[in-house]
Image (cartoon, grey):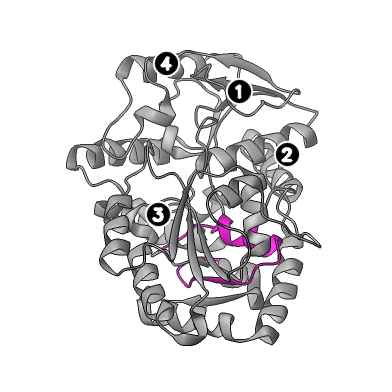
């Protein structure tokens, strides 16, 4: 089969981009029976595409990873150019690794659309605050669901949410999982990288670490409030909170300004470090050195940063509104959105060497069971089933 892939999210440094890059690399390496053509809309420097794939660039006026922002939308010209390319009659299957970049396809090809979660539907004002942008988002989502011959999501948790919210045919909705990239692993003698040392992170203090975006639904105001109460306790005077993620230029809705103000108001400027974007090697070193990783979101479709932390041997405190309890088991402690629960869980991990050791072993074992190769096998099975109809 000839398979067209909308790879316009390839340039997203986190989230959809990280997922698409890892999945497509594994898929191209595994599936030698089919021919993959990746369609990009930017020539900006990014991670290399899989050598097994044909790559076509349809230069957009504004690339998708910038245009499809929380406050905007892509131009009709850019969308039309991509739609025409994906609608070419030579393709048997068209794959969208995320519905975020979906465009209509006018051909008999089977359309496979990945829907990572229902966060935007559950918390619309926290993810897409503009009424105009929400209108465009909802139109795109409805069209994507209508055109899809197969819908794919990343966890059983997300599948249940999609079935309940959108009332789709369960036979049409499949799960293709995620995994930590191999670079996320336990180091025997972890040391801070030069980038971490430049930020003042020298491993002399215990660390609670958050990795991800700064959108309001990440519930980071509750994390900071919880940490403020932890920070004043005598036994935790050395503990710092490290917040990793883009603090500027993020296309997704961000509340980083409010978080910085909260930190200053609470007198935590010397105890909370906003690192900005970090390369994987720096994140891996940080997670190996950290005492606990915290993902307190209101909802996660998968929760990859928590799995990456577990793969580095870091105990995890994570949201109950996710599949992470199923994925990581005793490698994590799972909390509701309130800062009281978050505070209690972090305190438990900080206070017990025995608990941390037990969580570390369970987390490492759970993370090892999740591989991108397994995800690629699941995706090949979905492609074959959809194409056979």
Please provide percent x and percent y for residue 290.
61, 66
Q: Which mark is residue 26?
A: 2
Q: Residue at x 67, y 26 (%)?
A: 48
Which sits earlier in the primary sequence, circle 2 or circle 1? 2
In the rendering, at what x and y percent does residue 139 appear? 29, 37
**Which residue is rendered at x = 36% and y = 35% of the image?**
143
Most foreground residue, 326 or 156: 326
Q: Is residue 379 left or right of residue 72?
A: right
Q: What element carries label 2?
A: helix
* Location of mark 1 (residue): 38
Q: Looking at the image, is mark 4 or mark 3 nearer the viewer?
A: 4
Front position among marks 3 and 2: 2
Can see residue 177?
Answer: no
The kind of secondary structure element at disc 3 is loop
Tag count in the figure? 4
The reply to whether the magenta stretch includes residue 314 is yes
Residue 226, position as x, y percentages in the image: 38, 76
Question: Mark number for residue 118?
Answer: 3
Q: Tell me the residue that label 4 is attached to.
A: 60
Among numbered discs 3 and 2, the one appearing first in the sequence: 2
Front position in the image: 263 or 301: 263
In the image, the segment drawn in magenta is: 299-323
Distance from label 3 to label 2 (Cα)? 25 Å
Q: Distance between the residues labelled 4 and 1?
A: 15 Å
Q: Could you tell me if residue 301 is visible in this image?
A: yes
Marks 2/4: CA–CA distance: 27 Å
């Amino acid at each position: 089969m000839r398979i067209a892939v909308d790879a316009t999210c390839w340039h997203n440094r986190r989230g959809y981009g990280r997922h698409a890059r890892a999945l497509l690399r594994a898929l191209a390496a595994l599936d030698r029976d089919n021919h993959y053509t990746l369609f990009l809309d930017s020539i900006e420097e990014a991670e290399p595409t899989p050598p097994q794939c044909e790559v076509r660039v349809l230069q957009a006026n504004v690339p998708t990873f910038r245009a499809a922002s929380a406050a905007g939308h892509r131009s009709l010209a850019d969308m039309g150019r991509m739609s025409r390319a994906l609608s070419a009659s030579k393709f048997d299957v068209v794959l969208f690794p995320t519905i975020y970049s979906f465009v209509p396809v006018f051909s008999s090809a089977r359309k496979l659309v990945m829907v990572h979660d229902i966060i935007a539907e559950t918390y619309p004002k926290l993810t897409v605050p503009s009424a105009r942008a929400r209108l465009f988002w909802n139109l795109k989502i409805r069209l994507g669901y209508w055109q899809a011959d197969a819908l794919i999501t990343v966890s059983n948790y997300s599948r249940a949410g999609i079935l309940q919210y959108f009332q789709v045919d369960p036979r049409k909705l499949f799960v293709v999982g995620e995994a930590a990239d191999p670079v996320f692993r336990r180091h025997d003698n972890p040391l801070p990288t030069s980038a971490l040392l430049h930020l003042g992170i020298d491993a002399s203090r215990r660390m609670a670490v958050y990795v991800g975006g700064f959108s309001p639904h990440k519930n980071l105001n509750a994390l900071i409030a919880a940490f403020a109460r932890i920070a004043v306790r005598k036994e935790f005077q050395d503990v710092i909170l490290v917040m990793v993620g883009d603090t500027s230029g993020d296309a997704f809705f961000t509340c980083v300004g409010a978080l910085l103000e909260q930190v200053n108001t609470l007198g935590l400027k010397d105890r909370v470090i906003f690192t900005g974007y970090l390369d994987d090697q720096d994140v891996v070193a940080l997670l190996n050195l950290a005492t606990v990783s915290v993902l307190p979101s209101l909802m996660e479709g998968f929760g990859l940063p928590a799995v990456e932390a577990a793969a580095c041997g870091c105990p995890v405190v994570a949201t109950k509104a996710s599949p992470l309890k199923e994925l990581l088991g005793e490698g994590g402690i799972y909390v509701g959105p309130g800062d009281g629960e978050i505070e209690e869980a972090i305190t438990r991990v900080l206070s017990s060497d025995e608990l941390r050791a037990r969580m570390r072993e369970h987390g490492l074992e759970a993370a090892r069971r999740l591989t991108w190769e397994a995800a690629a096998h699941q995706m090949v099975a979905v492609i074959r089933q959809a194409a056979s109809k």
